[in-house]
Every structure is written in structure tokens, then in C-alpha cells.
Amino acid sequence: MQLTVNIKAASFLAALQGKTAALQAALVRVMTRLSIEVQRGVKETKLTGQVLHVRTGTLRRSINRRVIEQGGSVMASVGTNVSYAAAHEYGFKGDVDVREHVRKTRGGTEARVRAHTRKVVMPERSFLRSTVDDMGPHIKTEIRKAVLQAVRL
């Protein structure tokens, strides 16, 4: 998901002359702070009961962030590398292979379950995109403030 912030051009471009280093530094600072806020929002709100309930904590612990400076742009990324995260974020409908395993029955005996395929329908439960959507106005305001302060308008 990409969030775009527009700032009116004429006076802004005039004020920008010679201030690109200060602007870049300000953007890195604000994007770092905002990525921490988004990461915290995902972990403390969406993955602690609002969207998904904690079972093992693996998904919540895996939420990572980084700020990338490339050329003249500054980008922040908040995400996860857990394999099942996308199925929760976007939903999933399809076949899943189940490995052979042993399970305990209610009576306490063990039953062998053969390998098989089963159909799975999982509804979308967005925790990343919805956090960015919820925080969108705050993110835009903070970026705007940082940019205007860096060029002192």
C-alpha cells in the first residue's frame, strides 16, 4: 500500500532551494517515527484482539519495519515474513494439503490421520493495511508538518 502526500507547489518549490539535505533528514526522522507508530498499532491493536487473537505470538513478534532512502525518496515499510500472514491479510480460498499426523481423540486415544487435501475458505482479516488506513490522516499531517518545518514555511 502506498500513501501519497501532496503539498502545493509554487511557494514550496521556491523555499526548497538549498534545503534538500534538511528536507531529506526531516523525512527520514518522521518516517522512522511513523513506522514505529504503525508497527505499534498493528501489534497492540490489530493483533491483540481487534482483528486477530493471539495464539502463539509468532505473527505479532514478526511485525518488522524499515525506512529506505533511495535516490531522493524516503519510504517506510511495515510488514512480516510469516508465511500465513498473507492469508489473513487478504483472505484465502483454495485447497490445502494436510500432512499425515497423529491426533488425540476426546477419549484420550490416538488416531492416525492420513494425508489429504481439504478446501479452505478464510475471510480477509486485514491487520497491516487497515492500520495504515486508520492512521492515514495522522500520517499525512505529520509528514506535511515535517516537510514545512524543514523548509521553514
Image (cartoon, grey):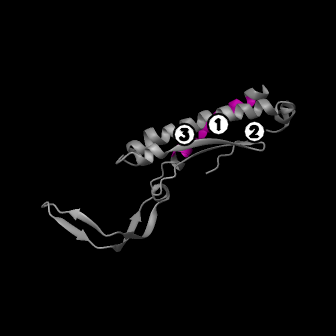
Image height check: is 130 above or below 31? below
> Is label 2 or label 3 in front?
3
Q: Give the label on residue 54, or none.
A: none
Residue linked to disc 3: 38
Residue linked to disc 1: 31
Image height check: is 47 above or below 104? above
What kind of element bears circle 2?
A: loop
Q: Residues within 10 Å of mark 2 (few under 14, many from 20)?
A: few
Q: Position of residue 30 (x, y in %)?
A: 65, 33
Q: Residue at x 46, y 41 (%)?
A: 43
Image height check: is 85 above or below 62? below
Q: CA distance from mark 1 to mark 2?
A: 17 Å
Q: Residues within 10 Å of mark 3 (few under 14, many from 20)?
A: many
Q: Which residues are magenta?
A: 131-148
Tell me if residue 87 can be seen.
yes
Q: Position of residue 128 (x, y in %)?
A: 52, 48
Residue linked to disc 2: 7
Tag 2: amino acid: Ile
